[in-house]
Image: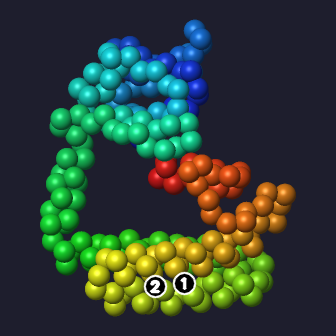
Amino acid sequence: MAYLYVTEQGAKITQSGNRIVINKEKQKLADVPLIKINAVLLYGNIQITTQAMRCLLDNGIETVFFNYYGKLYGFLTPPKSKNIVLRIRHYESAQNPQLALKIAKQIVQAKIINMRELLSRHLKNYSDSEISSAVASLNEWSRKSEYKQKAQNLLGIEGAATVAYFNAFRKMFRSELKFNGRNRRPPMDEINALLSYTYAIL
């Protein structure tokens, strides 16, 4: 278990030796060895004792706090974080505009490609002209992103591609659940709630 997600409202996290224990109203919900945990993610009304927090910090394990709906509150990060080298590389990249732009292009292109692939897989089973058109648009946005030399322009492409994707995304649902467009803070329907929750976890 790399990440320990705690979503049971009213749960309490304590330490027992080299283990993290989760209880609720005298019922044990989980008992996990520290060696199996890379990070702890808490959602909503979750209590954690000082001893448990200190134990996690001593073992280089980060704790992340979200509200019930998945909005990030903050991090409890140990002084010698397992991700310290990665963080240093992030700061170095941010100081190099050319490298930062190159990385930003890779991220935007990966997002567009993933959106395109999801729509393309749907088309293999269900023909739809609107989804086909969106796939073509995503291909074009991906191509254009390669030539942008400013982050602002890259953000514009990412936004346009996302609009095209979600306009087609609503056509994929063949159940009682309906998706009429992306909304958040707060999400207004079941599909948007699932999307927001999943994005927060990722």
- Residue at 23% in and 34% down: 78
Which residue carries the number 1 mark?
138
- Quarter of the rendering occupied by the N terminus: top left
Q: Position of residue 174 (x, y in %)?
A: 82, 66
- Residue at 56% in and 42% down: 69
Q: How many numbered callouts? A: 2
Q: Amino acid at mark 1?
A: Leu
Secondary structure category for the residue under label 2: helix
Q: Position of residue 28 (x, y in %)?
A: 56, 16
Observer-nearest of 154 and 2: 154
Which residue carries the number 2 mark?
142
Q: Residues within 10 Å of mark 1 (few under 14, many from 20)?
A: many
The answer to whether marks 1 and 2 mark residues whose Cβ atoms lie closer than 8 Å is: yes
Q: Position of residue 96 (x, y in %)?
A: 15, 71
Q: Amino acid at mark 2?
A: Ser
Q: Quadrant of residue 62?
A: top left
Observer-nearest of 125 and 98: 98
Q: Residues within 10 Å of mark 2 (few under 14, many from 20)?
A: many
- Residue at 57% in and 16% down: 24
Secondary structure category for the residue under label 1: helix
194 sits to left or right of 178: left
Disc marking residue 24: none
| Picture layout, residue 15 above or below residue 110 | above
